[in-house]
Image (cartoon, rainbow, N blue to C red):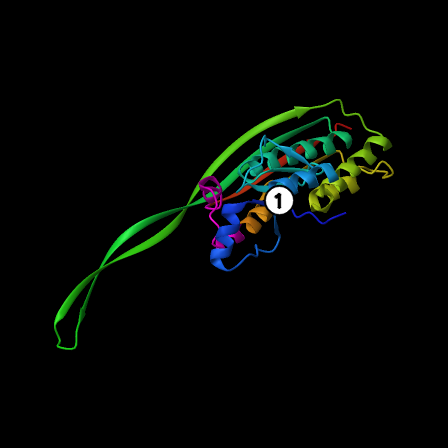
Amino acid sequence: MERINDVIYITGWNSEAEFLKSKNSNLPTGIKKYYVEDFEELMHKYNLKLTGIKVLKEGTVLVKNPFLKNTYVDFEDAEILFVHAKAQCISEILQNLGAKSFVTKAHDKFKEKESRTLDVDVKHKNAKNEERGANYKSVKGKYQKKDWNFEREDIFSGTYSQQTYERAKEIAEETGLIHDVHISGLIDQRNPLNENPINSNKISIEMTSEFNKIRDIVFGFKGTKLTLNLKYQKILKTYHLATRDIEINFGE
C-alpha cells in the first residue's frame, strides 16, 4: 500500500505556479501534495473517507484523524473533531472496562498571538556632528492566555467481562491511546485476572496533543512561498492546550 501522509495539500495550477516562482517545489517534511483527481483516485483505491468536505479544491489542507480509520478532515475543522473523537474513544474504553460513572472536568488554555505596531523615534549624529532624527516601525507580538472550563458526568450500567475488557484494549490499540500512560495503566489495573482490580481512579488526559503534532507539521508551510488561506493562517497563530481530568467509579 502506498504510504499516505497524515497531512495532504491539494495542489493545482496556481499553487504549482507559486512553487515555480519560489524555485522550490518541495513541501515541508510530513506533507505530500496531490492534484484533486489524483487524491480522489487514492480515495477509491484505499477506501479513504473525507469528513465535512463536500468538494475538494485547490489549496485545501487535509489531515488524518488519528481516532477514525482512513478518515481525513479539513485542517480548519481538525482540532475540534480530534478532541471530540478522542473523548468518544476514551468514553468507550472506560465503559468496556466496567465504569459505572465518571465525572469529566475540562480545562482549555490557549495562546493567541496579537501583533501591534510601535513608533520608535531614534536620534543620531552624522559625520558633521549634526543631530538627525528618524522614525521606525517596530512590530511586536504577545500571547494572551484565556481559560475555558466545563464539567459533565456520564453514568453507565457497569457491564464488565473478559470480552468487554478485550474490546477496551482493542480500541486503545486501534486509536493509539494505548500509548497514553494513564490509559495503559488503567487497562492493566482492570485486568479481570487481577485478584484485586481497581475500583476507582482519577486520570488526566491531554486532549489536544494529537492536533498540536499535526499543527506543527502544517506550520512548516510558513517556510515556503505558498499562500495559505486566511482561516489556516489564523489557526497557526493560536495554540491550545486542553486537559481533561476524569474521576472514574467502577462501583465494585
Residue under the point 50% across and 41% down: 109
Q: Which residue is mark 1?
A: 210
- Other-residue count near label 1 (Cα within 10 Å), few / some / many at <14 / 14–19 / ≥20: some
Residue under the point 16% across and 77% down: 127
109 or 50: nearer the viewer: 50
Q: Whole-percent x and y of residue 249?
A: 71, 30
Location of residue 149 with respect to 206 vertically, above or below: above
Residue under the point 66% across and 38% down: 40
Residue 81, visible in the rendered structure? yes
SS under mark 1: helix
Q: Is residue 133 left or right of residue 14?
A: left
Q: Which residues are magenta?
A: 219-237
Q: Whole-percent x and y of residue 215?
A: 55, 47
Quadrant in the picture for residue 252: top right
Residue 227 in the magenta stretch? The answer is yes
Name the residue type under label 1: Glu
Location of residue 248 with respect to 59 vertically, above or below: above
